[in-house]
Every structure is written in C-alpha cells, then in structure tokens.
C-alpha cells in the first residue's frame, strides 16, 4: 500500500488490490473546492487513470459533508474576474468533471453527507454512487443567480431532463431516497455501515475482468442514445468478437468452465 499527499486538501491512496481512493480533506469548509483543489483533484484523477495497476477509483471526503461545491472565498474572488478570467476558470472545473467522467477505471462516489452544487456534479460523473442515509443533495446555483452549467451534461445524463429542470430551477434540497428515486445514487446505506458496504461492493468488482470492465464502460458511452442501425449492430458484434478472442476473454471462459477463479480475480479481499 502507498499513500501520497499531493496537498493537505486532497489525499491519494493506492492499495495493492488495485483500488485507488481520492479523498477531499477540507472538512472545515465542508469539502468545498477552489481553484487549487480543482487542479489537485484533476491531477490526481489523471494520475490514477494512467496507473495500469488500478481497477477501481473511489471518490470520498472527510467530515460531515461530501462537498459543498464552490468555496465562498473563491467565489468572492471570482466576482471581480473579467469575462475571460471567468471563462478560463470555468474551463478548469469543466476539465475536472470531464476527467472524472472519462476515467478508464470504474469510479465510485462514496457520499457520506451533503453534496451541493458542484458536489452533485462529482457524484453524477462517477459510474456508481453509494450514499449514506444521512446524505443531502442540492443544485443550489440559481439561489446565487448562477447556473449549474459545466456539471449539467453529467447531472442531466444521470437524472434526466425533467428532474434536472425541476431541481435546477427550485434549488430545493432532497434526501438520499429522492436521489435514488431519480437515479443520482444507486444504493443507500445506514451511515455506520457505509464503509463495510463499500468494501463488499468493491470486492465484488475486483472479481471481474479489468479489460472487460473498461470495455463495458466504453460500450455504454458508444451505444447510448444511438439509433440501432446496421453500423451499430456490426460494431457491437465486432466488440464481442474482439474480447472473446482476447487473452482475458479466453481466460474468463476457461475459468468459468473449470469452476476456478480467473487469474485476475482478487481473492484475499483486503479492507479498503
């Protein structure tokens, strides 16, 4: 196991079982992010993405809140920015969201508390979101006369157009049950059981083929909202033929038929 502190506000832990954990460590400001945190988070995600030993990326935070979104002091500073400065600053936040969404690893958000504004964006960018029963959510931008712009492609993709129109316009708070109902989160867990649930969840994922997980993620992005025409049919046939003929595909089928763990499966199941 290795642990590297990129900055006190962002921690990265890479474990020997192929799991990386990025933790926002600004509990004193409810894990709100400013330009430096955005830069650090982006760099951490890209570093993990480039690490071939990593299969799963966990995104978590310390303290009571998952993330309050933008830091108030940072917002005060931005109030005096020119249009061009605001645009360049927004591009950095957009880059963070894109890096998380496009990460080749299976990404899991562990939401232990409040996720507001950009914090909701981080949750929506992850492939899987697990929330404590105490979690709260709010797309609060319009209260400040702003819009949830750079996070909108990911939030709308997660919760759908009509739900997005509602929560973007009302800036109302909603709980974990509501978040699950609109598909922002996948599972709700008792607060004191969150870590154990995530341990079990990740250990199940580690039994799966790493290349197949990556290819499955790319497959969803490719076929989503596309017409089922001849081109798509042929492409999906090619994709399954490619992976069937691959070393991982052959090993997976052989392991299943021989009733043994595949050579990529993590069997010791260490704690996360």
Image (cartoon, helix red, strand yellow):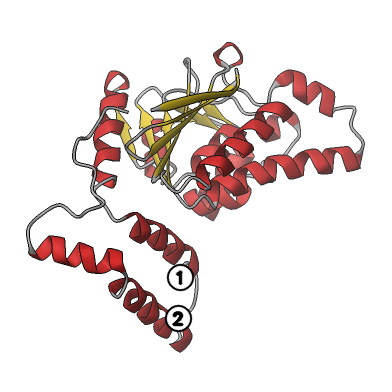
- Quadrant where the C terminus sits is top left
Q: Secondary structure at mark 1?
A: helix
Determine the image quadrant of residue 129. Answer: top left
Distance from label 2 to label 1 (Cα)? 7 Å
**Residue annotated with mark 2:** 232
Residue 253 seen in the current view: yes
Query: Residue, x 15% and y 66% (percent of image)?
Result: 254
Q: Which badge, 2 or 1, is on the more N-terminal residue?
A: 1
From the top left corner, tell me how far across and down residue 52 is, in percent: 45, 49
Q: Please rate how many residues cluster around mark 2, counting C-alpha atoms within 10 Å: few if below 14, some from 14 to 19, many from 20.
A: some
Most extreme residue toward the right is 82
Residue 140 seen in the current view: no
Query: Residue, x 85% and y 27% (percent of image)?
Result: 79
Most extreme residue toward the top is 28
Query: Residue, x 10% and y 54% (percent of image)?
Result: 260
Most extreme residue toward the bottom is 230
Q: Please rate how many residues cluster around mark 1, counting C-alpha atoms within 10 Å: few if below 14, some from 14 to 19, many from 20.
A: some
**Residue annotated with mark 1:** 223
User: Is 111 rendered above or below residue 150?
Assistant: above
Determine the image quadrant of residue 243. Answer: bottom left
Determine the image quadrant of residue 203. Answer: top left
Query: Residue, x 24% and y 35% (percent of image)?
Result: 200
User: Is 261 rendered above or below residue 96?
Assistant: below
- Tell me whether the residue at label 2 lies in contact with that at label 1, contact meaning CB atoms closer than 8 angstroms: yes
Q: Secondary structure at mark 2?
A: helix
The residue closer to the viewer here, 131 or 160, is: 131
From the top left corner, tell me how far across and down residue 16 is, in percent: 35, 34
From the top left corner, tell me how far across and down residue 211 is, in percent: 37, 59
């Amino acid at each position: 196991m290795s642990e590297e502190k990129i900055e006190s506000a962002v921690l990265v832990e890479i474990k020997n079982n192929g799991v990386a954990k990025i933790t926002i460590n600004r509990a004193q400001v409810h894990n709100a992010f400013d330009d430096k945190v955005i830069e650090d988070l982006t760099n951490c995600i890209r570093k993990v993405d480039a690490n071939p030993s990593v299969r799963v990326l966990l995104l978590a935070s310390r303290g009571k809140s998952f993330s309050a979104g933008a830091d108030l002091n940072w917002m005060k500073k931005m109030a005096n920015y020119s249009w061009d400065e605001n645009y360049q600053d927004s591009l950095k936040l957009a880059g963070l969201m894109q890096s998380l969404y496009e990460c080749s690893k299976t990404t899991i958000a562990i939401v232990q508390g409040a996720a507001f504004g950009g914090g909701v964006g981080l949750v929506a960018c992850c492939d899987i979101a697990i929330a404590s029963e105490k979690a709260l959510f709010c797309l609060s931008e319009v209260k400040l006369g702003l819009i949830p712009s750079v996070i909108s492609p990911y939030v709308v993709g997660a919760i759908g157009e009509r739900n997005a129109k509602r929560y973007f316009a009302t800036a109302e708070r909603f709980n974990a049950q509501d978040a699950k109902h609109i598909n922002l989160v996948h599972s709700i867990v008792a607060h004191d059981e969150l870590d154990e649930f995530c341990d079990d969840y990740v250990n199940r994922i580690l039994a799966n083929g790493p290349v197949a997980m990556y290819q499955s993620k790319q497959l969803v992005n490719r076929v989503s909202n596309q017409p089922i025409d001849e081109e798509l049919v042929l492409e999906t046939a090619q994709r399954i033929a490619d992976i069937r003929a691959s070393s991982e595909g052959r090993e997976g089928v052989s392991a299943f038929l021989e009733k043994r763990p595949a050579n990529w499966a993590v069997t010791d199941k260490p704690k996360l």
